[in-house]
Image (cartoon, rainbow, N blue to C red):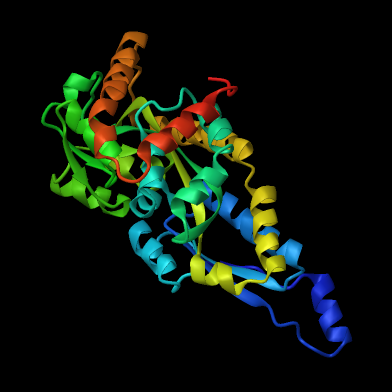
Amino acid sequence: MKYFTKLTGVALSAALTFGVAAEAKELRLGTITPDKTIWAKQARGFVAKVEELSGGELTVSYFGNAELGTMADTMKMTLTGRLDMWLGAVPALGAVAPEMSLLSLPYLFDSPTQAGCAVAKIMEPTRAAIGKKFHLLGFSAVGTQSIGAKEEFRTPSDLANIKMRTAPLKTTMTFFGSVGANPVPLAAAESTAALGTGLVDAVDFAPTFYVATGVNKTAPYFIPTRHTYNLGGLAVSTKTWASLTEGEQKILSDAWAAAMPLAEVVAQVDGFEAKMLGAHKKSGGTVVDLSDEEIALWKAAGLASWDKILPEMRGDASGYLATLQSAKEGCAP
């Protein structure tokens, strides 16, 4: 769906008064975010804030629901300057800036609140890691990754030989491989078909995507392992960012800060996930009630996989991880 801002009444009135139509600069934003989700609401809030702060002189056309292609496709478009802005998750960000993949380490964060607190502190180190590949306007929240499956699983050993859809990330692929599963890296949009054909038996998804895309109908068992807190961000094409005036760059930055304060965004996503899982249960789906002992087994397996993950990471993995761990200090677990 295309969504765009329009001139405010004040700006339009001024344009008519002087007999000149104000010519707005239009930017295009692409994302796979499904409609009617908290992610779409947040993104459109940013779009509206750009209009408000610019007085209608800077507009954003919003293309959601994978209208322009997959997360990887639209990221490539942004890197080449064919798309001005991209909103998505760590898998695509980490493919461009390897250090960012570390944000998806299993059990890196003790809670969504801690993730939001810590990541808010590492904007500049993250931009340094990205370099000139794109401009990171800010971080966003995707949600807590867990497992959706065709059958009930309770412990890591239950995943032996299970074909698990994962994002194309070394962190999650190595984690699931370490407990005996067979990781199958797929774009999120391909998951429903893959479940239907038997290519995969289970998926690694946050609750919102799990329910909003209908994956829960094919994989009705939701196992709340909460193994990763999935973060995202808004990337601006380097070409586009350089074409903007300092004033326009400030409008985008201020609009993001006002519309997407990370602590609030995390809380909103957390609340929406609870609603989505409630809808899943109401429709006949199952949310497995893991015991404290079972949760401890998942966490132990996740942390143990770090020894296999970290040596495979590219970029300044050790330096970025040290920055992340330091940022967690002072953040409530």
Q: How many marks?
A: 0
For the residue pair 287 and 227, the one nearer the viewer reads as 227
x and y percent of residue 63 in the render?
A: 49, 65
- Determine the residue located farthest toward the bottom in the rendered image: 19
Q: Is residue 10 visible?
A: yes
Task: Tell me the residue at 33%/22% (across/down).
Answer: 288
Task: Tell me the residue at 55%/28% (across/down).
Answer: 113
For the residue pair 74 and 286, the one nearer the viewer reads as 74
Q: Position of 45 compared to 301: left or right?
A: right
Instruction: Check the image and report above or below for 35 versus 51.
Output: above
x and y percent of residue 23 in the render?
A: 70, 82
Instruction: Check the image and report above or below for 106 versus 313.
Output: above
x and y percent of residue 197 in the render?
A: 14, 49
For the residue pair 114 and 131, the one nearer the viewer reads as 131
Instruction: Check the image and report above or below for 312 versus 112.
Output: below
Task: Tell me the residue at 34%/16% (across/down).
Answer: 295
Quarter of the rendering containing residue 317: top left
